[in-house]
Image (tube, rainbow, N blue to C red):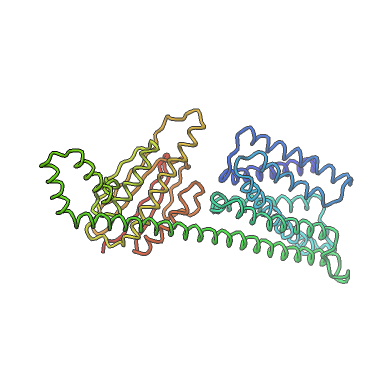
């Protein structure tokens, strides 16, 4: 009866673990409900077969552990949809977290159980039996579930936006660390890590071995976390720099357009005289060509919005043209105050990144809907409002999105669906002027609000 209860508790723990890992993977990958069922079925079936093979002593003891990990990684790669490198990376992260946290926790709980048996029950040489060993394993799985759940709340941008090369670079060290922990675990089970020489007694030999393994797994977790977070920080910094460079290029283009416009305005008197002469001679065709040439040189074809700021006018026109070309409903009500206090380059970064994110989110939603049965039922939209509110400049952009509802103040640097990296640059500008920024996803609408004090 106790064996049956232990098996049942183990199945419940692994089922909860699978639910947690699948939820984490679904934050970055896609999976159909059929494949999700297959994932559970193949996992439990494979786990049972590998356990039976290892229990019969027909294979080397370490092989079942490595086989289970290869099975798990293979199921993630085969049944989830997404880039191959991304799937391998997410599977590697889950394996590394599972292996390190489980082994660390099992060693800690085993040491505590041994201490309790030795101190409270006064057993001189306590040994964990099957029941107490299963309890330690179950507690270890609970710790893994909590660790994976905690990871789900703090996503990593490189999972969704990183290149295949970056993702492959991250996967290899994690898989190597996982294998090292497995080998060390096998060695600990065979007494290799015990160094007392038998002089301290069985109890202290076990405690010493568990302490060694706790230190090893703790250092491994620290190294893996430092490596992944460090690589992610490097990636984010590179993306921010590249986006700043694109904003610099756009700003230079705007300055060139302004320069052309100023030259045309400087010669406006001469142009009016020339046009008046063509009018008197009724040379309509030449007048049309002349006006078209003036329009091209002045960059007037890039106009459209009149906000009181030339940088914002051009950006709104360009982004609006792109949005309307994709069939996205575009509404704009922007009134720039005369003394905004925000540098034109910073305005370019502010409006450019927010509008790029909005357009890209709508485009992704269109792509997603085109592959579903309800395609075309909901039109994507972008709503832009900006004005002076008391002594502050308020900018609010709302756009349709396929993201799940999430209310949160501040900048969400995590978002894997596309609003994360660009908003880091926006945050830098907002903080530069002592402003505040908030994002919110509610009822299929992503809203970003920026409030900056006026100079």
Quadrant position of the N terminus in the picture = top right
Q: Is residue 259 left or right of residue 424?
A: left
Whether residue 388 is visible here, answered yes or no, is no
Q: Is residue 260 above or below residue 7?
A: below
Q: Is residue 307 left or right of residue 20?
A: left
Residue that protrudes farthest toward the top in the picture: 373
Q: Residue at x 58, y 53 (%)?
A: 151
Total number of numbered discs in the rendering: 0
The percent coordinates of residue 212 (x first, y second) are: 76, 66
The percent coordinates of residue 34 (x first, y second) are: 63, 32
Location of residue 194 (image quadrant) = bottom right
Q: Is residue 451 left or right of residue 171?
A: left
Residue that protrudes farthest toward the left in the picture: 280
Q: Is residue 179 above or below residue 440?
A: below
Location of residue 125 (image quadrant) = bottom right
The percent coordinates of residue 29 (x first, y second) are: 58, 43
The percent coordinates of residue 409 (x first, y second) are: 41, 53
Nearer-the-camera pick, 131 or 335 = 335
Nearer-the-camera pick, 252 or 25 = 252
Q: Residue at x 75, y 63 (%)?
A: 213
Q: Residue at x 53, y 53 (%)?
A: 157
Whether residue 92 is visible here, answered yes or no, is yes
Quadrant position of the C terminus in the picture = bottom left
Location of residue 321 (image quadrant) = top left
């Amino acid at each position: 009866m106790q064996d049956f209860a232990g098996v049942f508790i183990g199945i419940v723990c692994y089922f909860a673990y699978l639910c947690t890992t699948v939820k984490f993977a679904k934050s970055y990958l896609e999976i159909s409900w059929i494949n999700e069922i297959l994932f559970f079925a193949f996992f439990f079936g494979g786990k049972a077969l590998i356990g039976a093979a290892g229990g019969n002593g027909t294979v080397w003891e370490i092989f079942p552990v490595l086989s289970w990990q290869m099975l798990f990684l293979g199921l993630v790669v085969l049944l989830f949809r997404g880039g191959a490198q991304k799937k391998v990376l997410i599977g590697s992260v889950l394996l590394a977290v599972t292996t390190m946290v489980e082994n660390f926790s099992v060693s800690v709980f085993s040491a505590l159980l041994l201490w309790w048996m030795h101190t409270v029950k006064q057993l001189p040489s306590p040994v964990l039996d099957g029941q107490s060993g299963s309890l330690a394993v179950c507690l270890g799985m609970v710790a893994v579930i909590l660790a994976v759940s905690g990871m789900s709340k703090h996503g990593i941008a490189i999972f969704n936006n990183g290149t295949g090369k970056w993702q492959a670079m991250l996967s290899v060290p994690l898989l190597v660390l996982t294998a090292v922990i497995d080998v060390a675990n096998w060695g600990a089970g065979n007494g290799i890590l015990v160094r007392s020489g038998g002089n301290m007694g069985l109890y202290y030999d076990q405690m010493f071995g568990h302490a060694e393994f706790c230190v090893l797994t703790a250092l491994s977790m620290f190294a893996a976390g430092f490596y992944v977070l460090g690589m992610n920080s490097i990636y984010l910094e590179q993306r921010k720099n590249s986006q700043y460079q694109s904003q610099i290029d756009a700003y230079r283009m705007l300055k060139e357009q302004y320069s052309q416009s100023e030259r045309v305005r400087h010669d406006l008197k001469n142009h009016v005289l020339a046009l008046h002469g063509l009018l008197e001679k009724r040379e309509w065709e030449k007048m049309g060509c002349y006006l078209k040439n003036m329009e091209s040189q002045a960059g007037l074809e890039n106009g459209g919005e009149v906000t009181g700021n030339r940088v914002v006018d051009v950006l709104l026109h360009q982004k609006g043209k792109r949005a309307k070309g994709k069939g996205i409903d575009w509404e704009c009500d922007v009134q720039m105050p005369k003394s905004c206090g925000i540098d034109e380059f910073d305005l370019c970064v502010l409006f450019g990144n927010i509008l790029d994110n909005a357009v890209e989110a709508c485009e992704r939603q269109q792509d997603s809907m085109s592959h579903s049965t309800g395609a075309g039922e909901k039109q994507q939209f972008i709503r832009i409002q900006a004005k002076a509110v008391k002594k502050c400049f308020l900018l609010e952009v709302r756009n349709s999105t396929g993201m799940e509802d999430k209310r949160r103040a501040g900048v969400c640097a995590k978002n894997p669906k596309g609003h994360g990296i660009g908003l880091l640059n926006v945050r830098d500008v907002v903080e530069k002027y002592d402003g505040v920024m908030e994002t919110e996803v509610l009822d299929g609408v992503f809203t970003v609000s920026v409030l900056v004090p006026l100079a």
